[in-house]
């Protein structure tokens, strides 16, 4: 549910790669996923996940997929980037 296995898409070690999908209702409201958010501001997707865990970036978890708003991602980059640089 909420994920699709790509046909013929072998991941590392021959495992199939599972693609997790955004909730269509939240996507219609302008929410994006973690990977798209990372691309938006030019950081690693793990950085976006760290911002969510630390509370710098508000997000909504639906199933196993985090949903965030682009404006919040840009704000988190300004705030989170400063925190990351200082090690706080």
Image (cartoon, grey):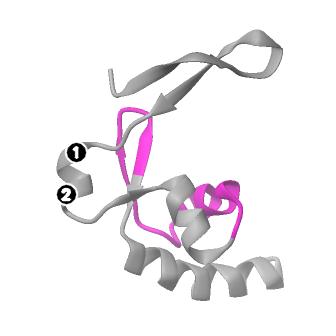
SS for tag 2?
A: helix
* Quadrant in the rendering for residue 27: bottom left
Image position, residue 11 (x, y; %): 72, 22
Q: Is residue 20 above or below residue 73?
A: above
Q: What number of labels is visible?
A: 2
Above or below for 42 versus 81: above
In screen coordinates, is 62 left or right of 18?
left
The percent coordinates of residue 38 (x first, y second) are 60, 64
The image quadrant of residue 81 is bottom right
Residue at coordinates 23% horizontally, 53% vertically from top-left?
A: 26
Which residue is rendered at x = 36% and y = 69% of the image?
69
Point out residue 50 in the picture as x, y percentages from the top left corner. 64, 59
Residue extending farthest to the front is 8
Query: Going 39% across and 80% down the picture, which residue do you hit?
Result: 71
Tell me the magenta residue range.
43-66
User: Where is residue 22 shown, x and y percent of the image?
Assistant: 35, 44
User: Which class describes the residues within 10 Å of circle 2: few (<14), some (14-19), or many (20+)?
Assistant: few
The one nearer the camera, 85 or 34, is 34
Work out whether residue 73 or residue 30 is closer to the camera in this orientation and state it: 30
Q: Disc 2, disc 1: CB below 8 Å? A: yes
The answer to which quarter of the image holds residue 87 is bottom right
Q: Is residue 11 magenta?
A: no
The residue carrying mark 1 is: 24
Determine whether the residue tagged by mark 1 lies in a helix, strand or loop: helix
Give the Cα distance between marks 2 and 1: 6 Å
Q: Residue furthest top?
A: 14
The residue identified by callout 2 is 28
Q: Residues within 10 Å of mark 1 (few under 14, many from 20)?
A: few
Q: Quadrant of the N terminus?
A: top left
Q: Name the residue located 36 percent from the left edge and 32 percent from the top edge.
A: 63
């Amino acid at each position: 549910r909420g994920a699709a296995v790509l046909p013929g898409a072998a991941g590392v070690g021959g495992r199939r790669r599972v693609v997790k999908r955004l909730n269509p209702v939240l996507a219609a409201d302008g929410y994006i996923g973690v990977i798209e958010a990372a691309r938006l501001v030019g950081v690693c997707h793990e950085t976006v996940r760290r911002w969510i865990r630390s509370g710098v970036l508000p997000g909504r978890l639906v199933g196993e997929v985090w949903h965030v708003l682009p404006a919040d991602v840009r704000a988190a980059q300004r705030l989170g980037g400063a925190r990351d640089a200082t090690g706080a």
